[in-house]
Image: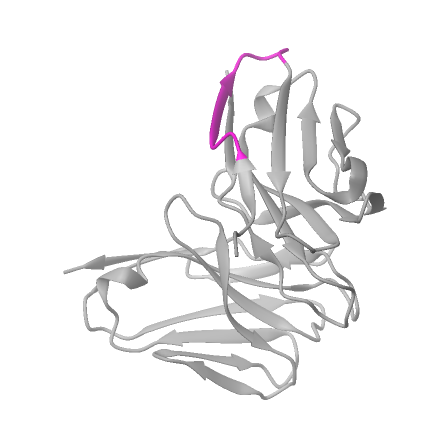
């Protein structure tokens, strides 16, 4: 069974440009999460989808970030316009169901560099 | 918000040595998780702890859920080159929460 996949693996853009990251969760997983790790710091939660609905977007930094999950399958995270502080590794994770605790399976991440 | 303080930030050891790292919080956690991130990959769950005082092993890895529920420890015995990576502690922010809070990570480097 395929794991969580993310595209692209790396992206280098200039400040002010737009970037869209994509995540394909494990098939059948209703929960999809976005996290971000800024260099050397902790991995921080951005938001959580249950199917196509945003369950929790409390970690989204500001309105330059827009996440979607149309149809409840893959998700996109768009940053527009990108700023220097947006650089980091963006991880997507997925998990099945909503039991007390479900293991989250992480993708390899997208490394975003904003120049 | 809740923060997990992980130490040490980095470790440089010789192959065969044992490794210890820990994670502390000012708040109680009901679940402690230890993840490992290999270079170019995403974090992979190593051990999950659900009960205060619990001691769980996974091969050469042993993790403990602190009795106060505010800390956790991860030990690696007889390190080998493939143990290189970044180790993160993590946990759900509160009982039943799905989003995870992570520590800053411990970067492990092994000299052969």
In the image, is residue A14 part of the stretch drawn in magenta? yes
Q: Nearer the viewer, residue B106 or A1?
A: A1
Q: Quadrant of residue B49?
A: bottom right
Q: Is residue A107 above or below residue B77?
A: above
Q: Is residue B89 above or below residue B63?
A: above
Q: Position of residue B50 (x, y in %)?
A: 65, 80
Q: Which residues are magenta?
A: A7-17
Q: Position of residue A10 (x, y in %)?
A: 46, 28
Q: Position of residue A63 (x, y in %)?
A: 80, 26
Please name the residue shown 51% across and 29% down the image: A8
Q: Quadrant of residue A74?
A: top right
In the image, is residue B37 part of the stretch drawn in magenta? no
Instruction: Judge left or right: residue A106 versus residue A56.
Output: left
Q: Nearer the viewer, residue B72 or B80?
A: B80
Instruction: Judge left or right: residue A111 versus residue A81.
Output: left
Q: Is residue B92 visible?
A: yes
Q: Is residue A7 above or below residue B1?
A: above
Please name the residue shown 56% across and 48% down the image: A4
Q: Position of residue A25 (x, y in %)?
A: 63, 47
Q: Is residue A104 above or below residue A32?
A: below
Instruction: Judge left or right: residue A112 versus residue A22.
Output: left
Q: In the rendered view, how is the structure colored?
A: one colour
Please name the residue shown 30% across and 78% down the image: B77
């Amino acid at each position: 069974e395929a794991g969580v996949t993310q595209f692209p693996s790396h992206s280098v853009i200039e400040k002010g440009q737009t970037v869209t990251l994509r995540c394909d969760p494990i098939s059948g997983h209703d929960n999809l999460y976005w996290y971000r790790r800024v260099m050397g710091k902790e991995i921080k939660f951005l938001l959580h989808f249950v199917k196509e609905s945003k369950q929790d977007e409390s970690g989204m930094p500001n309105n330059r970030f827009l996440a979607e999950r149309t149809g409840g399958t893959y998700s996109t995270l768009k940053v527009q316009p990108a700023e220097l502080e947006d650089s980091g590794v963006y991880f997507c994770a997925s998990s099945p169901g909503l039991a007390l605790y479900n293991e989250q399976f992480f993708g390899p991440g997208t490394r975003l560099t904003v120049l | 918000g809740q923060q997990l303080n992980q130490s040490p930030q980095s470790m440089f050891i010789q192959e065969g040595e044992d490794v210890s790292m820990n994670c502390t919080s000012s708040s109680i956690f009901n679940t402690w998780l230890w993840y490992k991130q290999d270079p170019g990959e995403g974090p992979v769950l190593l051990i999950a702890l659900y009960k205060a005082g619990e001691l769980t092993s996974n091969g050469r890895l042993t993790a403990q859920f602190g009795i106060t529920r505010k800390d956790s420890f991860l030990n690696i015995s007889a390190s080998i080159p493939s143990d290189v990576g970044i180790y993160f502690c993590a946990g759900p922010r509160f009982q039943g929460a799905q989003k995870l809070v992570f520590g800053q990570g411990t970067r492990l480097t092994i000299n052969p």
